[in-house]
Image: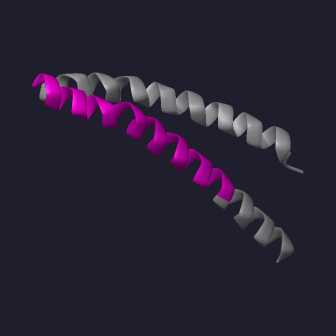
Amino acid sequence: PAFMLSAWSRYSQITTRVLLCIILSIALMVGPAYFLDQYFGTWPIISGVALIFSLPLSQFLVVKSMQDYIKKNPFN
C-alpha cells in the first residue's frame, strides 16, 4: 500500500506538470495572437501560426520539465 501511494503521487505530479506545460504554452502563444487577429482583422492567420509554434514549444517544455523532475525525484 505504501508503494501505491508513492506511485499515485508520482503519477499525479507528472500528469500535472505535463498538462500545465501544454496548456500554458498554448494559452501564452494563442491568447495574444487572438487579440492581434481581432485588431488586424486577420482572424485565423496569426492564431493559427501561433498554435503551430506553440505545439513544439509545449513539447520542449514537457521534456525539460521531466528532466528536472527526474533529477530531483529519481525512480528507485
Q: How is the image coloured?
A: one colour
- Against 69, residue 43 (above or below) is above
| Residue placed most toward the observer, 33 or 73 | 33
Residue 30 position, x and y percent, is: 33, 34
Residue 74 picture quarter: top right
Residue 28 sits inside the magenta stretch: yes
**Main SS, magenta residues:** helix
| Residue with the most extreme front position | 39
The residue positioned 83% from the left and 38% from the top of the image is: 71
Which residues, given as a range, are shown in magenta?
Answer: 13-41
Residue 32 picture quarter: top left
The residue positioned 14% from the left and 22% from the top of the image is: 40
- Against 42, residue 73 (above or below) is below
The residue positioned 85% from the left and 74% from the top of the image is: 2
Residue 47 picture quarter: top left
Quadrant placement of the N terminus:
bottom right
Count of number-bearing discs:
0
Position of 71 compared to 14: left or right? right
Position of 13 compared to 56: left or right? right
The residue positioned 54% from the left and 41% from the top of the image is: 21
- Against 56, residue 27 (above or below) is below
Residue 23 position, x and y percent, is: 45, 44
| Residue with the most extreme right position | 76
| Residue with the most extreme left position | 41
